[in-house]
Amino acid sequence: MRTNAGPGSVGRLWHVAVTVVVLAFLLIPLLVTVLFSISTTWESTILPEGLSLQAYANLFTDERFLQAMGRSFLLAVITVALSMLIMVPTIFIVSLYFPRLEKWMQSVVLLPFALPGVVAAVGLIKLYSSPPFAISGTIYILIGVYFVIILPFVYQGIRNSLRSVNAIELMEAAEVLGAGKPTAFVRVILPNIMPGIIVASLLSLSMIFGEFVLANMLVGGSYEVVQVYLYRMLGTDGHASSATIVTFFALVFLLFALVLKIGNRKTRTYVPSDGGKEEPA
Amino acid sequence: MSFVNIRDVSKSFQQNKVLNRVSLSIEEGEFITLLGPSGCGKSTLLRAIAGLNPIDEGTIEVGGKDITPLPPKQRRVGMVFQSYALFPNMNVYDNIAFGLKMDGLNKEQIRPLVEEMLAIIDLKGKENSFPNQLSGGQQQRVALARSLVKKPTVLLLDEPLSALDAKIRRTLRGEIRAIQQRLKMTTIFVTHDQEEALTISDRIFVMNHGIIEQVGSPNEIYTSPASEYVARFIGNYNVWSREQLQGRAIRGVPGEGEMFAVRPEAIRMQALDAASDSAGGIVAEGQVKLVSILGNVLRFEVDVSGLPVTVDMLSGQSLDHLGAGTAVTLFIPREEWKSIKKSS
Amino acid sequence: MAGRSANQHQVKLLLLIPFFLWIFAFLLLPAIIMLVSSFQNDGGQGFTLGQYVKGLTHPLYTDAIKNSVILSFVSALIGIAVSVMAAYSFTTFSPKIRDRLLNVSNIMTNFAGVPLAFGFMILFGTNGMLTLLFKEMGLSFLVFDLYSWKGLAWVYIYFQIPVGILLVYPSLYAIKQEWREAASLLGASTGQFWLRIGIPVLLPGIVGTFSVLFANAMGAYATAYALVLRNFNLLPIQIGGLVSGDIYPRNELGSALAFILFLILIIALLINEKMLRLARRGQ
């Protein structure tokens, strides 16, 4: 049954209107960017003068763009892989065996929100611009700091996964059946939180692809990633810029679609008994 | 020599003493129940036997072996959890085979054992189903099979039927009992449901705040509760203190005892007969306040000079003349007037 | 009982070391360095409150703080208002449509920073599509200068909305239909329902989300940076300039300003935490 806010069709109309206006407001800037990327010239007219896919042809043969994409990919994949490798066991151990530590972790994991790009950059630049850890300007400092940026989301995703499969009880059941803790973790916990891990990974990938501030301030041209490339193209080449944005967004869209698919798959989550369901003959 | 020996086991959570020097002995092949309300310590004791909760003091012996220092995986106990804890990523076959894999058996050795178990729990044909495709009762049987296939020395069941609804519970508990007797498996069953405990146990241990209040067969517990706590917990006993009986229309109350318990179905009731004599028992006079139909039992709430008394009678006899408002005489045979210990 | 678990305990702690090392190196240590640096003089020596004095008295920086706070406040306020209305309207649709709408919101949170600046430039730049369109249609009053505060505000409002919708939606979804029905049976009108039941129940969620949106805008750097190179006097822009400027970096002053921003953000986050706790108790 649908909820109705106001009397009959007037209420209906209002909600549809609000939704349409908000959606339009959100989608139009993106749509015009797409339009620009497939335009021939669009200087001082309301609509483009013509349509063409030349911008994309140029973009995907541009060495600089391709290298930037490559760097972004490398950076994102390495960061996410390392994050999962370290965080999955960490969160598992903490939430199952160190409840008091978990409280502390919950606060620490929120810290990145108080240390956004510029703020984090201050300390990072001072710390890593000179020996012995002169990683400023390389991929390494970005891997280091992006790990921290995706931390809140990775933590949330994995912890919720562990909760929803009732990890504590599964471990106990496995141990009573003769499994040691590592065996139980690998055979019984990991397979069941895999969807959660994948979702967290995909979301993290899309976040890293979209990050600009730290990529620009800590590394800039020394390791040019897509967002920095985009910024540098902004004033000079509108077609390259718009095509880059559209490509970036297509990627985000793809990652997101995967997340939905994995999230909606009939997940074999933990199911307590459903009481009176009739036993099939 | 008892098969399972628990001696002076204590456990505290923070300041709360959940188990207070609990001792009990179980014979091989016995089906015993730990019965009590939430918080009485029964689940904690069970988990201590499984090795999932460490204990502060005491020893636990199973089959002559002191298992107190051993981790769960070395104790060779089987445990069925309240929410079954079936592994969602494995089908029925793999769930049941898991423990055997942990023992190092190979595929050929595992197969016949799992198939035998599937037959016992009557789920042949469901080997490839996953837990979320099964009903509650089926999941429960898989959980049982998973533990039994390893032939544990003792089987522990932590309120395995609590999550099921009434009809399935009754069927399933009968099946569990049947399987247990067939395999002669020493079993410890935990529940808060007294009807469940009375139906399937060889012996019942009634627990209260970390101690065992009474041990006995279902019949003993039911007909001779030792304390006020047990009497109130089991059945629908009428429980009265001596003070409460003062100044009421009751004759023949024995001289000893501070606290008394009488089963509702042990009281005989008829229309008021002032000449009733209290030889051989206790006589009371009162008025019927309320009659409730509980299926095959009629429950009468009788007011005896202000004291509420519950009387149960099997329906089917013509009892229309004893409707609300009727003046009645109650007779309680001497042997049904139980003296019990007062509980703090 | 003791022997076996002590060993296992050690192994577990050992496995936690990588995590601790990493957040020390890339979260805690930089934050500490920033703090220490903020108390040093321009040469990086000594202990002085001079940087904070400068940051809180010099008109350039006080303006930056003021502008940031106002911009963040306004964009969060309008953002939350629009989000609440939109999210509530979403709840009135069927589950399938509701999900689609939320998914769209979710994806659009990624359209921020540099890409967003570009999108707005196409629409509202000097030769922007809508700029030209409005002039053509005689609606010149609708034209605004993208490179002004008004323009920036619109862009900030834009990226607040998807985030706001996602954060506030769960609270709205919690307004149970049964409450409305019970209220109307007891004689309450729609207005009275919202006044006495709906809004009080929603308030913690709304305040908490407002707080997050405020923090979101306070820390935003890319958008303003991309629109016109540091034309806007905002706190993050100032910090960025002091720390990696091409003139010569003044890390210490930047640290002090960064720490001030950090404190503002922590307060906003704490408010949100408190609101979440209030909301949870209510349910």
Image (cartoon, rainbow, N blue to C red):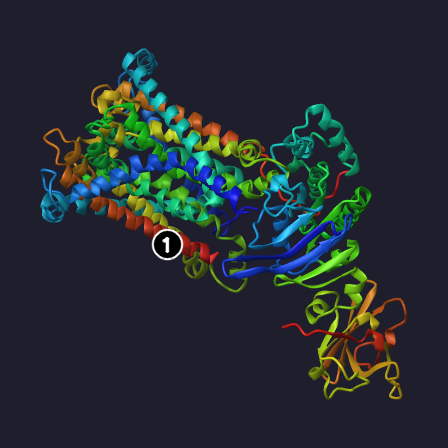
Residue C9 position within the rendered picture, expressed as x and y whole percent measured from the top left = 47, 41
- For the C terminus of chain A, the quadrant is top right
Say which quarter of the image contains residue A241: top left
Residue B67, position in %: x, y? 63, 46
Position of C64 with respect to B157 (left or right) is left
A93 over A257 or under it: above or below: below
Foreground of the two, C121 or B189? B189
Of B166 and B156, the residue lying toward us: B156
Q: Which residue is mark 1?
A: C274
Q: Position of residue A151 (x, y in %)?
A: 38, 37
**Figure check: B248 above or below C202:** below
Indicate left or right for C56 with C108 as reference: left
The quarter of the displayed image where residue B12 is located: bottom right
Chain of the residue on which disc 1 is drawn? C
x 29%, y 15%: residue: A40
Q: Is residue B75 above or below residue A263?
A: below
Examine the rendering and report whether any part of residue C231 can be seen.
Answer: no
Count of picture labels = 1
How far across and how far down the image is residue C253, in percent? 14, 41
Dot 1: few (<14), some (14–19), or many (≥20) neighbours within 10 Å?
Answer: some
| Residue for point 52% across, 48% down | A3
Instruction: Kindly identify the amino acid type of the residue bearing the numbered disc 1.
Output: Lys
Of residue A228 and residue C116, the one placed in the foreground of this image is: A228
Residue B78 appearing in the image: yes
**Is residue B342 toward the left or the right of residue C251 in the image?**
right
Residue drawn at (31%, 16%) of the image: A67
**Element type at marker 1?**
helix
